[in-house]
Image (spheres, coloured by chain):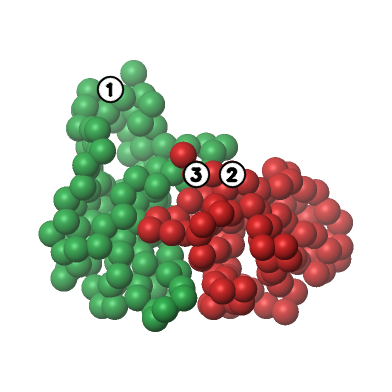
Amino acid sequence: EPEVTQTPSHQVTQMGQEVILRCVPISNHLYFYWYRQILGQKVEFLVSFYNNEISEKSEIFDDQFSVERPDGSNFTLKIRSTKLEDSAMYFCASQGSEAFFGQGTRLTVV
Amino acid sequence: ILNVEQSPQSLHVQEGDSTNFTCSFPSSNFYALHWYRWETAKSPEALFVMTLNGDEKKKGRISATLNTKEGYSYLYIKGSQPEDSATYLCAFNPYSGAGSYQLTFGKGTKLSVIP
């Protein structure tokens, strides 16, 4: 079964610090996404990525967020200056005919 | 903002009971409806991708139906087992041109099957 891998599984960071969340999507997929889930709330769309550029982003995905695919395999989400409210599970998804999710990174901002 | 609603929010059933829950979504600009099964501490697992009005898909004891004209999908579990306990998420996939298939998720239905 295809697998999307995310690292780290858990990251604790101080408010104001930069974090980079990493994802290795499925190799022959073309569409990649980041979602997040704040505890007790819905899974929320952050951004989609196609053909090496952002194709859509939500209101949540402000200037503090960026994504890139630096080496053609990893897909990263960077949060430049973390806030307490950024604490959430962040999921990467890779889509061909269906979407596959990674195990998630639990980000805790203290 | 796309409205994807799931009901009920949570459900407790006895082992062996059959159950069903609902996902409602916008009836316009439909491309696909996805169902996921999400166990605690694991990533969402794709169950079905449904694209055609009237579609019915089946995977073992789990099946789903789709009505795109009225904007709803039902997920059925026949003879529930404790291992079916999970949160079942639906996600609406509108058509938005080439290059993106953004999914909007419902909040999920949390199913607990009591042995």
Q: Give the mark nearest the N terminus, 2 or 3.
A: 3
Residue B90 coordinates in the image, percent (x, y) = 36, 55
Residue A14 coordinates in the image, percent (x, y) = 86, 56
Q: Amino acid at mark 3?
A: Pro
- The relative height of residue A75 versus residue B36 in the rendered view (above or below) is below
Point 80% across, 49% down: residue: A12
Q: Which residue is mark 1?
A: B15
**Circles 2, 1 touching at the beta carbon (< 8 Å):** no
Q: Is residue A87 visible in the rendered structure shown here?
A: no
Indicate the chain coloured green by its letter: B
Query: Number of numbered discs present?
Result: 3
Q: Which residue is mark 3?
A: A2
Q: Which of the two residues, A54 or B79, is positioned nearer the viewer here?
A: A54
**Circles 3, 1 touching at the beta carbon (< 8 Å):** no
**Secondary structure under the numbered disc 1 in the rendered image:** loop
**Secondary structure under the numbered disc 2 in the rendered image:** loop
Residue B75 coordinates in the image, percent (x, y) = 25, 46
Residue B76 coordinates in the image, percent (x, y) = 22, 41
The quadrant in which residue B42 appears is top right
Q: Which mark is residue A103?
A: 2
The quadrant in which residue A35 appears is bottom right
Point 51% across, 57% down: residue: A28
Q: Which residue ends up furthest to the top in the rendered image? A: B115
- The relative height of residue A103 versus residue A37 in the rendered view (above or below) is above
Q: Is residue B60 visible in the rendered structure shown here?
A: yes
Q: Which of the two residues, A85 or B37, is positioned nearer the viewer here?
A: B37
Indicate the chain coloured red by its letter: A
Please name which of the two marks, 2 or 1, marks the residue nearer to the observer.
Answer: 2
User: Crowding at label 3, few (<14), some or many (≥20) Cα neighbours within 10 Å?
Assistant: few
Point 62% across, 46% down: residue: A5
Q: Which of the two residues, A5 or A61, is positioned nearer the viewer here?
A: A5
The quadrant in which residue B19 appears is top left
